[in-house]
Image (tube, coloured by chain):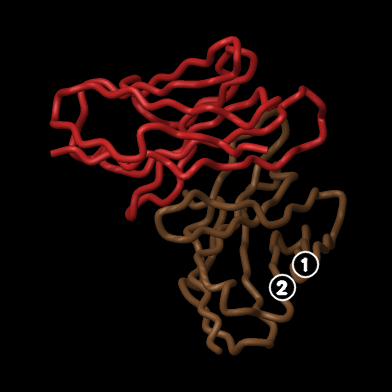
Chain colours: A brown, B red
Amino acid sequence: DQQVKQNSPSLSVQEGRISILNCDYTNSMFDYFLWYKKYPAEGPTFLISISSIKDKNEDGRFTVFLNKSAKHLSLHIVPSQPGDSAVYFCAASGPGGNKLVFGAGTILRVKS
Amino acid sequence: KAGVTQTPRYLIKTRGQQVTLSCSPISGHRSVSWYQQTPGQGLQFLFEYFSETQRNKGNFPGRFSGRQFSNSRSEMNVSTLELGDSALYLCASSPGTGSKAHQPQHFGDGTRLSIL
C-alpha cells in the first residue's frame, strides 16, 4: 500500500513564478515529513522538513505546509529558478527511528 | 564537512553471486540507513543501524543484510543475486543521538548495481 503519494508525476513552471508540489499520506502515525531534491546520478539532497507539531516551516525560497486533518503537505518554491529543475520526493517517518517512506516523486521543470 | 561516501559507485555482477557495498557516514553521525531505488518500486527502506545494532528493518528478504562498525561505517550485503536486485542502493546518515526529536537524513550518491 502506498502510504505516501505524490499524485502529480510532473510539473512545469515559468521562471520567477511559484512552484507548488503536493503530497498526501495515509498513516496517521507519521509525525515528521521531509522534502528532498534529486538530480540524475546523484543522491537525494535534503531541502526542508516539518514536524507534526507545526503547520508551516520556511527556509529561504522554500516553505512547507502541513495540514494534519487532511493528511496533506505541500512544498512552495518562490521564486522558481531553472536550477530548481529536478525530481522532488516527499518522505515521512513515524516515531522511534529513521525509516523513511517515500512518495514516487514529482519532476519539476522550471522554464526560463 | 565531508558528506556521505558510498563505494563503489558502479558494480556489475551475475546472478547467484554476492556483493558488499560500503558506506561512510558524515563525521559524528551514528545512524546509517540503506534504501533501494528502482524504476518500478521507487525508494524503499532496507534497514537502519545505530551503534552497531539494527534498529529498523524494511520488507526485504533475508538475502539482504547489513552491519555497522564501531566507527559508524556500514556495509550491506546481498547474497544469491537475482536480476531484480538491479537498482541504485543509497545510504543515508543522521546524528541519531537518541533524542526524541527527528533529524533529517543525508544521502550519499549511491551504488549502481547491475545484475547480468
Residue extending furthest toward the front: B1
Relative placement, left or right, of A18 versus A67 is: left
- Other residues around mark 2 within 10 Å, as few (<14) / some (14–19) / many (≥20): some
Picture coordinates of residue B64, whole percent (x, y): 36, 24
Picture coordinates of residue B54, whole percent (x, y): 55, 17
Q: Are marks 2 and 1 on the same chain?
A: yes
Picture coordinates of residue A103, whole percent (x, y): 53, 56
**Residue pointed to by mark 1:** A63
Whether residue B9 is situated above or below residue B54 in the rendered picture: below
**Residue pointed to by mark 2:** A76
Picture coordinates of residue A44, whole percent (x, y): 54, 51
Secondary structure beneath dot 2 equals: strand
Relative placement, left or right, of B17 versus A39 is: left
Whether residue B48 is situated above or below residue A10 in the rendered picture: above
Q: Give the CA separation, mark 2 to mark 1.
A: 5 Å
Is there CB contact under 8 Å for labels 2 and 1? yes
Name the subunit of mark 1: A
Please state, as top left, top right, bottom left or bottom right, where the C terminus of chain A lies in the image. bottom right
* Count of numbered tags: 2
Whether residue A8 is situated above or below residue B106 in the rendered picture: below
